[in-house]
Image (cartoon, helix red, strand yellow):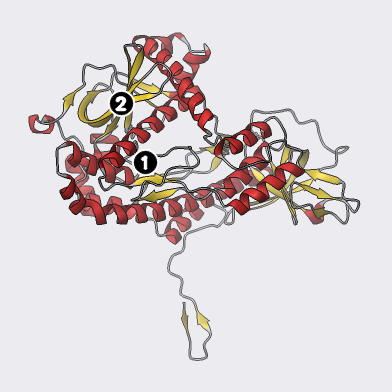
Amino acid sequence: VTFDKRGDPVARVVTAYGSADSARVCADAIVDAAGIPSAFPPEVSGQAEALRDAGITPADLQGREDLRDWTIFTIDGKDAKDLDDAVSLDPEGEGWRLGVHIADVSHYVREGTPLDREARRRGTSVYFADRVIPMLPEALSNGACSLNAGTDKLTLSAILHLDKDGNLRKSEIRKTVIRSCVRGVYSEINALFDGSADKKVQKKYAAVRPVLDNMRALARRLKEAAAARGTMDLISSESVFVLDEQGHPVDLVARATGESEGMIEQFMIAANVAVAAYARRRGIPFVYRVHDQPDPTKLQVLSETAQRLGLKTVRLSAQPDLRELMEEARETSYARLISDRLLRSMAKAQYSENPLGHYGLALKDYCHFTSPIRRYPDLSIHRILSDAIAGVPKDELARRYTAFVRESADLSSQYEVRAMTAERECEGCYKAEYMARFLGETFPGVIASVTSFGLFVELPNSAEGLVRVDDLPEADLRYDDVASLVNKRGRPVYTVGDAMTVRVAATDVSSGQVDFTPVAASDAPDIPARDGKLD
């Protein structure tokens, strides 16, 4: 935009993206507007291609512990290709030796190289319905660094020695080489756990089934310990899209997670804690994942909200109180509302060079160690840990990395927010394009939130739309500042958790907005539940 002699603005078209009714086109514009780098510069791609099929030389193995005879395997989503973490579990006396083995990306992405500069410029991989914008080129993320089964891979391993209840007795961080024996898939392992696995799946995991059963038992103990210390357990509302060959959404479902996803999450958290404690004890420069305490004023508002909703947990002064409130809310129709309000009362987690603790996880020490393929802070601390393990003196580590960790923490925090904002905006665009297929159709939903201007109604597939207050049949409704639209007498007419049948009235793909209108109970058709699908 420029200004002419009269001061009037003059706009020049820089890029024509295409139809605003296409979520894919809107995603292109969102990526550019956010300043997210997409294509890799030639020198970066060239360096990555040279490393794609890099073998492991005797020099690479110097200073590494050989764990190729350990029973180690990966567990990821069915379509995942960047496998950056593997796990092992072995009995050790009356306790356990848990191994979390992470791709040694820092071996390939050396500081100051084109690959490193580009990874730092991106900060994180960004995930959209139709694409992934990776932090590292696929030649590395899906090739040299991916812990593919049956292939020797260089790793950084956190070895945790636990008692029978999952309490950490001691830990070690080692440079290692591993060979994953199975490419595990969450859905298959969930089927093993719930007894629905077919013979093909049972055969695939036969050699590691005893290990999986032990992992399952250990993860349950770790989860119990997390609950006891007050870890937040909020409600997730992620969505999964199915796209056709042209990239248009043809199905939408709420993401379901099973026991194996939770199991791996517990192991990754345990490794992150051990690594952060290792760094803090040694006083070395580091990038920590920190989460500050919530604002007391916001907690007071949350307490008043809980009280007005009739919940008993209203004294909110410590982490266990907040967890207790969420657990109580799960038994009511206010679960989603309380989860959202809890999240809003929290500070934003970020990265810091100072070990300030993690309030949401109720942990003194925490970092992000387990995803160096897709997060620059993880790659940063791998680089520092490698030098520390190699015996670099503490004062030399301080000289090399003090300024580095400050910059890495700051940029990583900024780029994480940038990525999350773009992902959220793009998800809205895809939901709106999907719902445009159902204009005029009627569906059952639940009131997810209430505002002064209307109701947000969520469908079983996770799509959400606005019912404007002007479209409601009742007059003189007002918001009670908690969870309801009330009438003149103050009686709730529409409340969070109420069922509501709605008609899809309008969609705007570019803004991600979906509008519903209410359907009177007498006019509502008999709509069977369809497992989150609308077609």
Relative image position of residue 244 (x, y in whole percent): 50, 38
**On the image, which quarter does residue 369 sit in?**
top left
- Classify 10 Å Cα crowding around label 2: few (below 14), some (14-19), many (20 and above): few
Residue 193 seen in the current view: yes
Q: Vertically, is 307 above or below 71?
A: below
The residue located at (49%, 19%) in the rendering is 190
17 relative position to 444: left or right: left
Number of numbered callouts drawn: 2
- Side of 50 relative to 37 (left or right): left
Please, what is the three-letter code of the amino acid marked with disc 1?
A: Cys
Measured in 3D between alpha carbons, the distance from the residue under mark 1 to the one under mark 2, in whole angstroms, is 18 Å
Q: Mark 2 falls on what kind of element?
A: strand
Query: Is residue 41 in sight in this rendering?
Result: no
Could you tell me which residue is drawn at 28 percent across and 40 percent down?
279
The extreme right residue here reads 489
The image shows residue 519 at horizontal and vertical percentages of 81, 43
Residue 162 in the image: x percent, y percent?
36, 21
User: Is 291 left or right of 474, judged from the image as shown?
Assistant: left
Which residue position is annotated with label 1? 367
Q: Sequence-wise, which precedes: disc 1 or disc 2?
A: 2
Q: What amino acid does circle 2 point to?
A: Lys
Task: Report the disc number at residue 118.
Answer: none
Say which residue appears at 68% left-offset and 38% top-offset: 459
Residue, disc 2:
170
- Give how far across and how far down residue 271 sits, in percent: 35, 31
Secondary structure category for the residue under label 1: loop
Front-lying residue, 234 or 441: 234
| Camera-side residue of 178 and 245 | 178
Q: On the picture, is 220 further left or further right than 96?
A: right
